């Protein structure tokens, strides 16, 4: 879940470290911890918050209150599922993101078994955004094996990597793989992405209200075309690869577990029997992937089906991520004068209402995301 501002971002990250400390504390308390490093984990949590000046404000946030409400129940379920076992909780947020995983922590058992868990602390536990990226990365992650953030392995030599945004190298490899007809789609996406940069580079676009109408129109029009072309590209690829990637995007490949905490409850894929049965169906030979552009909209519908019917479905929209490029650009946030802005990108400048942020606006890009609804399992 994206943080709304720098302080909220710090609260969110602090919350992830806090959860690891709380769970390890419960493991020690119940005599099932492999390692008694509770003090170390507490210091990691508190020093992180203190270094960012949120050690007091964090106590009043959902990122603390929600885990406090549900972690004991989660832990009891863990003990029930794995009786007579010992385990530790270890944070993996940074390493996991670099490897393209969603996991925020791992549960390491005394026999060496490791379970990776993606943690989400949000207002609703019945759904979650599991994957995001750009139009180009959406296709790249199907055709190539990711090596690190933004980099992929050369399909003809695993020892060589390349940047996914390096068009000449990428397109050459795509042609060598035999997907010549997909290259023009990539070229169109690159061209649109560069063309849209005018919104965060021109003097006219310095203020969001000058270009708001045109920006919204272009986001929708180009988004519709991107969805149509992306579906075309998917049809040209190996359908086994497409299915495998869509399973990974939606977290249906049984590689990692999901824990969603909210003020009203929580969802954990590890304990939910109904969800586990659905996973068995998705991962069976009888399961097939169906997809198509949603009529009149800028996205693609995906569904996994077997002889019993639909198992899972999700929608991936194609749009542009403004990434907070303009300061308080919503009308309800309007103010007079100038305000000093720091933000996550350390702007350190004075800006007026709806004025472009010099650093943050550089993150403006094409965007896809995948939201999965778990309401039927909750």
Image: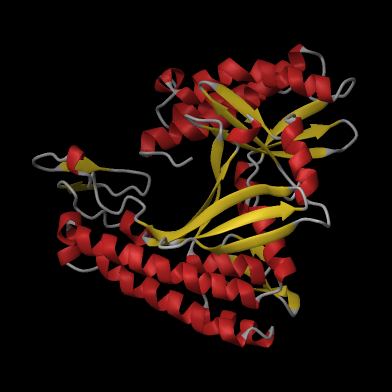
Looking at the image, residue 196 sits to the left or right of residue 73; the answer is left
Looking at the image, residue 33 sits to the left or right of residue 74; the answer is right
Q: Residue at x 79, y 25 (%)?
A: 35
Residue sticking out furthest to the left? 336
Q: Position of residue 295 (x, y in %)?
A: 45, 62
In which image quadrant can residue 120 be found? top right
Looking at the image, residue 84 sits to the left or right of residue 146; the answer is right
In the foreground, 5 or 237: 237
Q: How many marks?
A: 0
In the foreground, 345 or 373: 373
Q: Is residue 345 visible?
A: yes
Q: Is residue 251 visible?
A: no
Q: Position of residue 281 (x, y in %)?
A: 78, 47
Looking at the image, residue 127 sits to the left or right of residue 324; the answer is right
Q: Which image quarter is the C terminus in?
A: top right
Q: Residue at x 47, y 29 (%)?
A: 123
Residue sticking out furthest to the top? 29
Q: Position of residue 201 (x, y in %)?
A: 25, 67
In the foreground, 31 or 194: 194
Q: Position of residue 325 (x, y in %)?
A: 30, 54
Q: Residue at x 54, y 66 (%)?
A: 137
Q: How is the image coloured?
A: secondary structure
In the foreground, 245 or 163: 245
Vertical comparison of 78 with 208: above or below: above
């Amino acid at each position: 879940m994206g943080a709304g501002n720098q302080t909220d971002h710090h609260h969110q990250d602090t919350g992830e470290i806090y959860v690891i400390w709380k769970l390890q504390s419960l493991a020690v308390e119940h005599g099932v911890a492999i390692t008694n490093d509770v003090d170390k984990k507490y210091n990691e949590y508190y020093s992180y918050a203190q270094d960012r000046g949120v050690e007091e404000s964090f106590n009043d946030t959902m990122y603390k209150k929600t885990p406090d409400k549900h972690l004991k129940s989660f832990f009891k379920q863990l003990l029930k599922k794995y009786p007579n076992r010992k385990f530790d909780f270890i944070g993996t947020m940074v390493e996991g993101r670099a490897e393209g995983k969603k996991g925020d922590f791992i549960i390491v058992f005394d026999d060496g078994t490791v379970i990776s868990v993606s943690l989400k602390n949000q207002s609703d536990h019945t759904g979650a955004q599991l994957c995001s990226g750009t139009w180009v990365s959406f296709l790249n992650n199907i055709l190539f094996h990711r090596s690190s953030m933004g980099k992929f392995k050369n399909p003809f030599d695993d020892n060589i990597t390349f940047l996914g945004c390096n068009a000449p190298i990428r397109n050459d490899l795509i042609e060598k793989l035999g997907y010549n007809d997909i290259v023009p789609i990539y070229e169109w996406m690159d061209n649109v992405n560069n063309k849209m940069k005018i919104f965060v580079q021109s003097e006219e676009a310095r203020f969001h209200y000058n270009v708001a109408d045109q920006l919204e129109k272009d986001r929708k029009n180009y988004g519709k075309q991107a969805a149509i072309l992306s579906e075309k590209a998917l049809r040209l690829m190996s359908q086994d690869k497409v299915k495998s990637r869509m399973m990974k995007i939606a977290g249906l490949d049984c590689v990692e577990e999901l824990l969603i905490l909210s003020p009203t409850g929580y969802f954990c894929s590890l304990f939910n029997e109904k969800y586990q049965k659905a996973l068995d169906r998705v991962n069976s030979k009888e399961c097939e992937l169906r997809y198509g552009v949603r009529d009149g909209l800028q996205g693609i519908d995906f569904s996994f089906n077997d002889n019993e019917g639909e198992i899972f479905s999700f929608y991936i929209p194609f749009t542009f991520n403004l990434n907070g490029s303009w300061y308080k650009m919503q009308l309800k946030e309007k103010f007079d004068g100038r305000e000093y802005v720091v933000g996550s990108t350390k702007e350190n400048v004075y800006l007026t209402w709806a004025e472009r942020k010099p650093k943050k606006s550089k993150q403006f890009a094409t965007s896809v995301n995948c939201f999965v609804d778990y309401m039927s399992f909750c």
